[in-house]
Image (cartoon, helix red, strand yellow):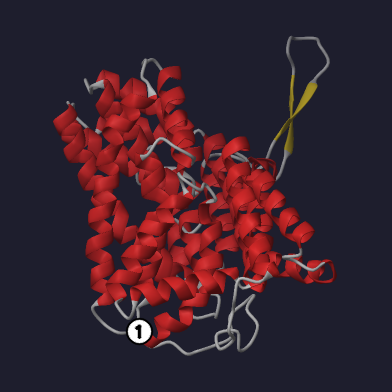
């Protein structure tokens, strides 16, 4: 099987093309899964295959799962994430109603003044805390960003620059820093690399992953500066979860705001203690409800608002997990690696480049660097050893191959999160304003940095 006709490659190309044509991403994932599954030899729906173990025995019947069956079964792989996003949406709407997000945004805007660069890079820096120090992941985006949209409109700030900054804030920290989500990510790398023949520690992972973080920082500076160089006009439209005229109201730290702040603290501590996003979001919502941050009579409206804000993202993540399961079930990932290995000719630079491209293709489809690591480590570790890469080079290749594609994938929370916040007034396109800019800003530097890094590490 050639690289061009590999089901993974064809499927990801179909997915990307449909998304670029503004075809609904949820349907695009399903169509791409069907294309990949059929090309991989899977039936569309489950079929019964009759066979006989031994001559003279009664024929047995075995059901062969179809693409749709694997897709549906695989959706459970992101069920916890989907539930977390719904609850985080409820949490975000509750915070928005309390006025806490508006207070924080006004304090921030007062500090930053009218500087586009100060706003973009400060948000990127503050957002990094959401992965390590206060691990609430993308939940801060729909809380902090919508109240700032009016100021961004006045600045004529191109929201693509902010989308890049937000994506950076939820990716670079967990790649580099072994705390919070970073500890989970680097722990997965350590465990999967060790399960496939090496013996490395978290320290080994951290010692090389800074190359990925530096590559992303360079991409952030270049691309965010480029998009900030020209003004872009936006209309002042109503914002989801924010009452009309809220920008003009005097908002103070009242009972609701204090309850929301305590709820945010409870969410952060629960996330650290349990490493469970659904549980931490639930505790945050219940805390706000008990302390009066959310009125019991308004609870249904808050929940419906949360579903409206994050429900689509949750469904996309569910289908993305099913899509990844279909690609894995075809066996096409292993075939892709074998076909690519034949083109490497023992050249380490070429091998590193091809391996990173494979990671890009896989993660673009699955939409999760965390979920990609177990898939590629199984193949990359033996292949890297065979090609003579050092353990640290293999770690770097596995880490960056997993991270590649997550920034820019239409099914990734790294792009869905920024879109949910920046599109609160309906003026930010997911594909062209979040995915494409982030893809260019981070994937190109990560590939370059990965190849150079592996050459240095040996």
Q: Residue at x 43, y 87 (%)?
A: 234
Seen in the picture, residue 132 relative to 398 is either above or below; the reply is below
Helix, strand or loop at label 1? It is: helix
> Where's residue 290, x and y in %?
79, 57
In what quadrant of the picture does the N terminus appear? top left
Q: Identify the image quadrant of residue 66.
A: top right
> Where's residue 281, x and y in %?
66, 51
Q: Residue at x 75, y 66 (%)?
A: 294
**Front-most of residues 248 and 55:** 248
Q: Identify the image quadrant of residue 114.
A: bottom left
Q: Identify the image quadrant of residue 209.
A: top left
Seen in the picture, residue 43 relative to 188 is either above or below; the reply is below
What count of labels does the image hold? 1
Residue 404 appears in the figure: no
Residue 112 is left or right of residue 349, and the answer is right
Residue 228 is left or right of residue 313, and the answer is left
Residue 134 is left or right of residue 392, and the answer is right
Residue 223 appears in the figure: yes
In what quadrant of the picture does the C terminus appear? top left
Q: Residue at x 46, y 47 (%)?
A: 131
> Where's residue 292, x and y in %?
76, 64
**Front-most of residues 225 and 457:** 225
Q: Which residue is under mark 1?
A: 155
Q: Residue at x 21, y 44 (%)?
A: 449
Mark 1 Cα shell of 10 Å, populated few (<14), some (14-19), many (≥20): some
Residue 409 is left or right of residue 267, and the answer is left
> Where's residue 59, x and y in %?
80, 19
Seen in the picture, residue 243 relative to 84 is either above or below; the reply is below
**Front-most of residues 149 and 358:** 149
């Amino acid at each position: 099987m050639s690289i061009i006709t590999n089901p993974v490659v064809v499927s990801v190309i179909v997915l990307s093309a449909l998304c670029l044509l503004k075809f609904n991403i949820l349907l695009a994932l399903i169509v791409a899964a069907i294309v990949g599954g059929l090309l991989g030899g899977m039936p569309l729906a489950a079929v019964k295959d009759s066979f006989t173990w031994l001559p003279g025995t009664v024929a047995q019947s075995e059901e062969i799962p179809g693409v749709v069956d694997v897709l549906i079964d695989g959706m459970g792989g992101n069920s916890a994430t989907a539930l977390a996003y719904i609850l985080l949406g409820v949490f975000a709407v509750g915070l928005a109603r309390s006025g806490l997000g508006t207070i924080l945004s006004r304090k921030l805007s007062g500090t930053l003044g009218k500087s586009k660069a100060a706003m973009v890079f400060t948000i990127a820096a503050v957002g990094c805390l959401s992965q390590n120090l206060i691990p609430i992941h993308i939940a801060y985006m729909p809380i902090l960003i919508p109240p700032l949209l009016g100021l961004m409109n006045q600045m004529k700030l191109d929201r693509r620059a902010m989308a890049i900054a937000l994506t950076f804030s939820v990716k670079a920290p967990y790649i580099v820093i072994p705390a919070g989500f970073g500890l989970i990510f680097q722990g997965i790398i350590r465990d999967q690399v060790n399960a496939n023949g090496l013996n490395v520690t978290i320290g080994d992972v951290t010692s090389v992953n800074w190359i990925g973080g530096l590559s992303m920082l360079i991409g952030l500076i270049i691309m965010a500066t480029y998009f900030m160089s020209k003004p872009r006009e936006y209309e002042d439209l109503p914002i989801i979860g924010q009452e009309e005229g809220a920008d003009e109201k005097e908002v103070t730290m009242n009972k609701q705001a204090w309850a929301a702040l305590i709820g945010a603290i409870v969410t952060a501590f629960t996330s650290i203690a349990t490493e469970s996003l659904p549980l931490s979001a639930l505790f945050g919502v219940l805390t706000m409800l008990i302390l009066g941050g959310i009125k019991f009579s308004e609870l249904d409206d808050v929940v419906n608002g949360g579903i409206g804000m994050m429900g689509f993202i949750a469904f996309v993540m569910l289908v993305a997990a099913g899509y990844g399961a279909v690609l894995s079930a075809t066996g096409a990932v292993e075939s892709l690696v074998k076909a690519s290995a034949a083109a490497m000719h023992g050249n380490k630079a070429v091998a590193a480049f091809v391996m990173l491209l494979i990671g890009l293709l896989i993660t673009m489809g699955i939409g999760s660097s965390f979920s990609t690591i177990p898939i590629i480590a199984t193949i990359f570790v033996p292949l890297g050893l065979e090609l003579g890469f050092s353990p640290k080079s293999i770690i770097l290749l596995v880490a960056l191959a997993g991270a590649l594609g997550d920034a820019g994938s239409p099914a990734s929370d790294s792009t869905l999160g920024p879109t949910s916040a920046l599109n609160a007034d309906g003026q930010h396109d997911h594909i062209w304003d979040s995915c494409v800019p982030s893809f260019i800003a981070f994937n190109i530097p990560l590939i370059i940095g990965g190849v150079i890094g592996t050459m240095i590490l040996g």
